[in-house]
Image (spheres, grey):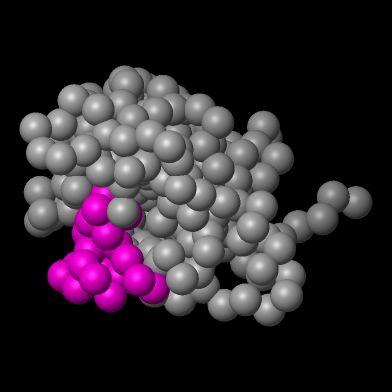
Amino acid sequence: MPYTYEYPRPSVTVDCILFGFDEGELKILLIQRGGEPFKGMWALPGGFLDIDSDPSLEYAAKRELEEETGLTNVFMEQLYTFGDSGRDPRGRTVSAAYYALLKLSDYQKVQAGTDADNVRWFGLSEVPKDLAFDHEKIVAMAIERLKGKVRYQPIGFELLPEKFTLSELQHLYEAVLGVELDKRNFRKKILKMDLLIGLDEKQEGVAHRAAQLFKFDKKRYEELKAKGFNFEV
């Protein structure tokens, strides 16, 4: 006998929050919706779980991201599940939100597809005030999660080029945390952690005095973490 489910079933969707860092500014990727509801409004990339072909929520998130923006091979981490009534005018909908940190230089080329009319990177100060659905709430939570993690895990290095200056690193932390950091104290603290590899290279093509370039030593970090090292900015 086929099993009959006696309770109503909500729809399941996925939403993707992608952060990138460029020219001293933290940015987020948004699409402009091409269909109802909220046609013409900006929103996070995402869509419905395909119950027949999506083996997991993460798979659905990556599929929707590729269909709407053209981006592939993006590692995403689950942020939270949103399921308040009224968040979707089409009916009760539960959404699993995923977020990622990207080197913006590697993901500049985005292309609107499927039901998206447009796609672009917005600086956090430029994000439209009214986003579709409850995406303002999702973005706000993602920013708070990012602020918390960047203080206690070296995830900030994922937003920078492979080679960077100490000033670029400081500007990243200032952009994420929304505060101005003391240059001398920040550099002293970062260098004391012994997680950076100083290179025999300097910036090129800059009008000011060229600064030394550094790389993040991931192997060293894993070794220290195994010994109980706590990263804290």
x, y percent for residue 227: 73, 75
The answer to whether residue 187 is seen in the rendering is yes
* Residue 78 quadrant: bottom right
The answer to whether residue 137 is seen in the rendering is no
Front in this rendered view, residue 108 or 199: 199
Residues shaded magenta: 167-189
Front in this rendered view, residue 106 or 125: 106
Q: Residue at x 61, y 61 (%)?
A: 221
Q: Is residue 179 magenta?
A: yes
Image height check: is 128 above or below 7? Answer: above
Q: Is residue 48 magenta?
A: no
From the viewer's perspective, is 196 left or right of 37? right
x, y percent for residue 60: 56, 39
- The prevailing secondary structure element of the residues shown in magenta is helix
Image height check: is 187 above or below 21? Answer: below
Q: Residue at x 73, y 70 (%)?
A: 226
